[in-house]
Amino acid sequence: MRRRTPQSALGDLLRAQFSANVRELRKRRGLTQSQLAAASGLGRAFINQVERGHCSVTLETIGAVATALGVRPAALVSKDPEPNVESVLTPERDAASDRMRAGRRG
């Protein structure tokens, strides 16, 4: 038996915003769906479904797409996906932030 994803107005809004942001950010970076798929480790057909809002995504998928596009995961559901350059997330920058936060705790 296939498990159904719960439906809600907020979920629909988040899916629509995510879909629009993925498409917009991909196009801003001059990437094709195939290039985004390769960079994120996902399939091109799946990226197409995501951009059309035809599927729900996991947190892992959000992380993979955000990393491939060079943005924080939250940017993918934000009304303004790139408010400034400071929102860009790279593995190196994220690791440096983690080290800084850890130092403050000690």
Image (cartoon, rainbow, N blue to C red):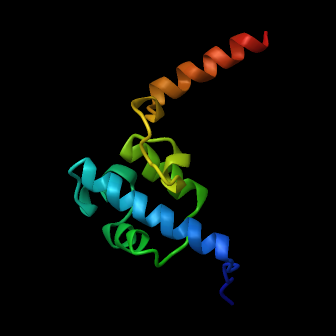
Q: Is residue 68 above or below residue 87?
A: below
Query: Residue 31, how many percent across, how many down?
Result: 23, 53
Q: Is residue 103 left or right of residue 70?
A: right
Residue occupying image coordinates x 56% and y 54%: 60
Q: Quadrant of the C terminus?
A: top right
Residue occupying image coordinates x 70% and y 79%: 6
Query: Residue 83, how many percent across, how many down?
Result: 44, 40
Kindly give the residue lying farthest to the bottom in the view shown.
1
Query: Residue 99, how many percent across, how many down?
Result: 62, 17
Q: Is residue 56 above or below residue 104?
A: below
Q: Nearer the viewer, residue 1 or 45?
A: 45
Query: Residue 37, how many percent across, how many down?
Result: 33, 59
Residue occupying image coordinates x 69% and y 83%: 3
Numbered label tally: 0
Q: Is residue 12 left or right of residue 52?
A: right
In which quarter of the view is residue 4 placed?
bottom right
Q: Is residue 77 above or below residue 91?
A: below
Residue occupying image coordinates x 59% and y 74%: 12
Q: Nearer the viewer, residue 42 or 31?
A: 31
Q: Nearer the viewer, residue 38 or 85?
A: 85
Q: Quadrant of the N terminus?
A: bottom right
